[in-house]
Amino acid sequence: MIEAHVERFMAMGTRVELHVFGACDPQALLLGRRAIEQVDDALTIHRPSPTVSLNEALAAGGAATIDDPTLLAALIETRAMMTLTEGLFDPTVRQGAPRRAWELDGARGRIAADGPLAFDFGGMGKGFALDCAAAALRETGVQSGLLSAGESSILTIGRHPTGEPWPIGVPHPFAPGEFLAEFDLADEALSVSSTVDASAPGRQPTLRGDDGSPVSAPCTAIAISARGSLAEALSTALMVASPGERARFADRDPSRLLCFRFDGCDAISLVQPGVRTCDA
Amino acid sequence: MPDNPFDLSRRLFLDRVAQAAALGSMAQLAPWAAASAAEPAGRERVRLGIIGTGDRGRALIQNILKTRNCAVAAICDDYAPHLDKARALLPAATPSFADHRAMLDAGGIDAVVIATPLHVHAAQTFDALSAGLHVWCEKAMARTIADCTAMVERSRAANRVLQIGHQRLFNPTYLNALARARAGEIGTITQVRASWHRNRDWRRAVPPGSDLERKLNWRLYRESSAGLMTELATHQIQVANWFFGALPTRVMGSGSICFWKDGREVYDHVALIYDYPGGRKLVYTSLLNNARYGCEEQIMGHKGSIEPELGRIYAEEPPRVPGLQQLRRDVAKGRRRTIPIGGATWFPELPVTTPGESLGWGEYDESMLQFEAFAEAVKTNTPAPGLLREAYHASVASLLGEQAMDQGQPAAWPAALAFAEPQTAG
């Protein structure tokens, strides 16, 4: 019988489950949980946090120092992903105002903006948190695990206990019991972004990062990447991207990317660049 | 199954109290419960004279008849139809009276049970105490805070037991819930959201052509009642005080005659916030034109919630992800199947629909049990500890709530109204 360990808790505004298989340090799951809670504490904008303090400091533009290492790491990651997605993924809040330029000096922990600026890491926070949890778990020797933050962000550690990749099926939103797509994952993260059921309570509208225009048509984007934060940023960007932009992402990054729009119950693939099996 | 279903009720009560006691210091949380669980002192029954034989009075008589240690020795009501209905429940020889003073003068009783309109509770209590009798009185205690206080003071001066009807104090589900809350299962309790919603006019039929409207529908008129506050809210304020382990510091509220515009004087719709120390709150609503949410107290802590009327306790832990439960089952069997996961983000903002865990809900007869406790208190002339304090604070809080609504401004809890336990000799 293979050992199975689990930690379930609320964080990042959703439910988180950490599943680890095989022999496991008794403290491993607790360390994984702590890593996610630390990210939550740093990035939340729903209670006092370093991000809230930063947003208050940047409310009138200018410069601010970032003391919190988790927030600084998230900002460094954010800059990289904004570049990768040509600004379609953008965690800054517009609120109707022109998008402000901002510069980050990661080495000095300084940020400068040329106007009012605020960050909302909802578009990558869960993936970033799973990355931190996975690092903590791997450090304790975990070799097989599946981590979920709200079910839209999944991260796998190693392989399924059978020795094969993790078989993941993304449910079809309009066809109960059927999968929209199936993947094999190994040491990879998967993120799903969707405008299906966008009017449900708690859902934020999906906006293009460059001009703030909303995506109203029902569609679903899936990204599978080496890191959770990258997968989240890519699935978000994919949702709002034009066909040409999607193709450029695929050329630039080895992530597996899928995007569907829905015509009634039929899923129509818009782009499927770079789809490979995990063993390819 | 026992011949007498109330033996089952009692046994369930004792079992549940024992369960609750195992969780914590029940002697501290609800000392009267331990007293109720004890065997009766002696075999004699305490003789009760019932003042008020309306619907509630007759329900109490039926409960008293099921006790091990009480007897209905006399009945009294100044409304003949009610008295006639009560006679039908009792042996023909049971003395009956139209005036409570006549019943007191006739003797042959150890205590009175008062189930009359609120505004006469105090005067009837004073009369009974003056006659050397113990008093069990329906909640709320009295129409004014001053009368509530006077009832406590006079019972002490007379050295007689005064007990108020708050049956939740004898309900094992509540006792169990309290014990689990105090054991920390639902974490720090910051809010109790309580409601008592009904969808009926609260009127009683009045004989055509009579002048009995204010007598029979006393709950609808300010002279005789504070309406929803004294008739319903008292129960739930007591529960909030109990779970918070504190008294309100102030209350603010709004009341209106919103739906039943039929000449009544008391509000048919109330909404109040009671502040407790530390920023904790009781959020209370009661209305008479929608019963969807019924009667409940939702006791909310940072680790979970308790809904005692439903008899459920809920952990804050979210429901498990079905696809990952399947994964665990498959791994246990050495199987690999596609894991269905990866949809829209799960949000916790919708009401929890998970069933929670049972608190040992059952059909108890707490009204009967509180009379058994009263009888034991009468026999030993020793009030069940803590009961009067709970009732007094609940009655005062309900009347303060009425005051806040009437005046349209918050009402602070006067420090002088905190119940002081009597000093014991020795």
Image (tube, coloured by chain):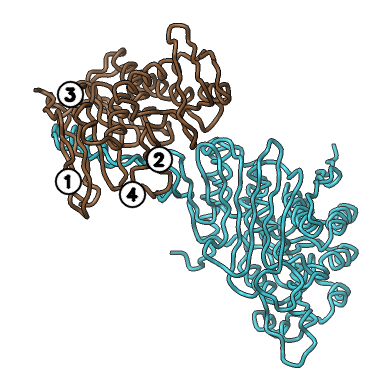
Q: Reply above or below: B200 against B383.
A: below
Earlier in the chain: of badge 3 and badge 1, it is 3
Give the structural element (helix, strand or loop) at label 4: loop
Q: Amino acid at mark 4?
A: Asp
B194 on left or right of B359: right
Whether callout 1 and callout 4 share a subunit is answered yes
For disc 4, the marked residue is: A197
For disc 2, the marked residue is: B318
Chain B's colour is: cyan
Q: Amino acid at mark 3?
A: Asp
Subunit under mark 4? A
Evaluate if marks 3 and 1 touch, with contact meaning CB atoms under 8 Å apart. Answer: no
Subunit under mark 3? A
Give the structural element (helix, strand or loop) at label 1: strand
For disc 1, the marked residue is: A268
Whether callout 3 and callout 2 share a subunit is answered no
B34 on left or right of B151: left
Report the front residue among A172 and B237: A172
Q: Nearer the viewer, mark 4 or mark 2?
A: 4
Per the rendering, the mark at residue B323 is none
B128 on left or right of A33: right
Subunit under mark 1? A
Q: CA distance from mark 3 to mark 2?
A: 40 Å
Taking the spot 63% from the left edge, 65% from the top edge, the residue there is B287
Label 4 Cα crowd, 10 Å radius (few <14 / some 14-19 / many 20+)? few
Q: CA distance from mark 4 to mark 3?
A: 31 Å
Label 3 Cα crowd, 10 Å radius (few <14 / some 14-19 / many 20+)? few
Taking the spot 63% from the left edge, 44% from the top edge, the residue there is B243
Q: Nearer the viewer, mark 3 or mark 1?
A: 3
B146 on left or right of A207: right
Per the rendering, the mark at residue A251 is 3
